[in-house]
Image: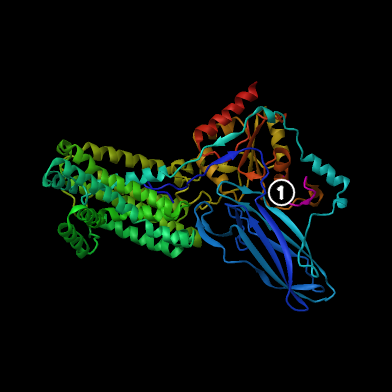
Amino acid sequence: MRYLLLLLTAFLVSTTVFSQTLDPIKWKANVEKETDDTYILNFEATLDKGWHLYSQNEAETDEIAPTPTEFSFDSTPDTYTLVGETIEPKGIQKYDNIFEMDVKYFEDNVTFFQKIKLVDKTTKVIKAEVFFSVCDDERCLAPEVVEFTLDLNQKEAIENKGDVSSITAADKEKSESLHIQVKGKEAFPTEKVEDKSYLNIFILGFLGGLIALLTPCVFPMIPLTVSFFTKGAKDRKKGLFNAVLYGLFIFLIYVLLSLPFHLLDSLDPEILNNISTNVTLNIVFFVIFIVFAISFFGYFEITLPASWSNKMDSKATSVGGVLGIFFMALTLALVSFSCTGPILGSLLGGSLSSDGGAIQLSFGMGGFGLALALPFGLFALFPNWLNSLPKSGGWLNTVKVVLGFLELALAFKFLSNADLVEHWGLLKREVFLAIWIIIGIGLTLYLFAKIRFPHDSPIQKLSTTRKVLGVVTLAFVIYLLPGLSNTAYANLKLLSGFPPPLFYSVYEKEAHGPLGLNAYTDFEEGVKAAKAQNKPIMVDFTGWACVNCRKMEEQVWSYPEIMKILKDEYILISLYVDDREKLSDDQQFKFLKPDGRVKDIRTIGDKWATFQTLNFQNNSQPYYVLLDSNMNLLNHTTAYTPDTKEYLNWLKKGLQNNKK
């Protein structure tokens, strides 16, 4: 999950976008005889690194959801029966922030088992079919079907590629209708999307540390500690060394706090995500953050046992030297916990629930520790700067109260996660935003001194800082207001991925294009519209189970200039490659694939997935193509592009080429 100032929702890995047909999964099957009339059918899938195959138990919905793996058999009451359901291993279970639900998937290698019992003992051949789709962190592939013919007298099964002789002239005609002559493929170079690093989470952790510096638990310690080192040492050089060492130890202590999570990560790479995204734990986090908020408001103080800090302080005094300085740094970490604890809790909860896991946590903690450590080193180097520090006073408590409002807002994100997983319907998108609006109004009133908390000093005159923050908070509240409506303005781009998704709404949602855009779901109809309106086409190869398709729509397409171009300048054709609605009987046909397999085109998704692979030699989503109505390619094809400026320029270049 993402946090204001502290966290990133997603860490993006590098990808090269080019026309390619991906084949990251291989299936094989075999038969094991148990008794004279019972057999075990084994179906083994081997996946390339980074790819996921989803469980059979994933629920299918009309909204974004993983595509479940399905097994079907040609059993009849006269031949053989299935003994129980197809068994799958434990797999990996976690809450997915994009699917907004618990998902179960498999990596690397997985085997499914189906027990059968013969009714007719002369039965020797079993036919089975596997329907599946695979995804990685950047894309999903269109659902595929693999068919097997299992001979009970042979251990290894034969993959059934279909009967080529069964393809009729009508099948060939329908297959040919999927083929379009795309012109200009050679004119556009491929595109490379640069990778991003953990620098972002480090910077956000650093910002969190800077905020912690401004709290009553930490800020007064800066001049006291620096003066202790610079004046208490025998010479200035020694005092400077000790102060810098003190800062270094502060940094190391916060990094060391993340090490236990690396141990958990090494035992099970998914354990951190499983723990932190558990429904019960999300509710626990919700309660904890509410407690943190009340503490920041000044109604009580959260502190670690005084004996801990006293013991560390006595160690620092008695040991002395480098080890003594380490214990002084540890003492600071302990005594400042009442202010830093809630911020660290945000960092912990957010890091462990995202793909970066313990590594991301270490970067965040390192940034946090560095921000706390820097003042001690810098003020030791330049002691005159201490004179420029503002005096401690009521403003420090104001910082704590403001943090309390932020903690209160973040608490409802944890409750929202649990609500989405369990489908309680308590925090629909508009309800969630309404709570944030109320919290924002409360913060605005506080900043303008209309409400007070226990430790606030009387305010004679509002400072410029409070006025500015009050105006900014009020502006944020106003920004949230359209989110309560059932209009195109309800998609709040700056918060994309943080509130519940658009479809989790109190309003009844009618079927329409992404973000309310007018989108054709049939290629031929879209081309006719393009010819009639004399506009270029953007083909959007997408899917209901496509994570990054939703990210692109909510985070990139929602950018005002991009929305305007898609709405006014292009004919949008959204082709859902995993749409399982059956084609009418007269539209179904058999398609001969280049590898010699016969594919049954039974559903809308089958048709558009084949259309994409046949014409663009690519089978991943999201995938975007710019064409004119005469099938001239207007720019290079592209895929997941989180940079709005880059995507906007790509669209504009297509418009420019269309005018030539």
- Give the color scheme: rainbow, by chain, secondary structure or one colour: rainbow
Task: Where is residue 589? Give x, y as percent.
Answer: 81, 49
User: How many numbered circles are shown?
Assistant: 1
Query: In this rendering, does residue 73 appear at all?
Result: yes
Q: Residue at x 85, y 74 (%)?
A: 122
Q: Residue at x 44, y 56 (%)?
A: 416
Q: Is residue 589 found inside the magenta-colored segment of the image?
A: no
Residue that numbered label 1 is attached to: 604
Mark 1: amino acid: Ile
User: Does 482 sit above or below residue 144?
Assistant: above
Name the quadrant of the C terminus: top right
Query: In this rendering, does residue 277 appear at all?
Result: no
* Residue positioned most to the bottom: 36
Quarter of image, res 31: bottom right
User: Does 40 sit above or below residue 377?
Assistant: below
Task: Where is residue 597? Give x, y as percent.
Answer: 79, 51
Say whether residue 582 is left or right of residue 459: right
Say whether residue 591 is left or right of residue 539: right
Q: Is residue 603 found inside the magenta-colored segment of the image?
A: yes
Task: Where is residue 656? Give x, y as percent.
Answer: 60, 24
Say whether residue 420 is left or right of residue 260: right
User: Does 496 sit above or below residue 313?
Assistant: above
Crowding at mark 1 (Cα within 10 Å: few <14, some 14-19, many 20+):
many
Q: Nearer the viewer, residue 426 or 185?
A: 185
Task: Where is residue 333? Give x, y as percent.
Answer: 25, 55
The region drawn magenta spans 594-607
User: Does 320 sit above or below residue 542?
Assistant: below
Label 1: element kind = helix
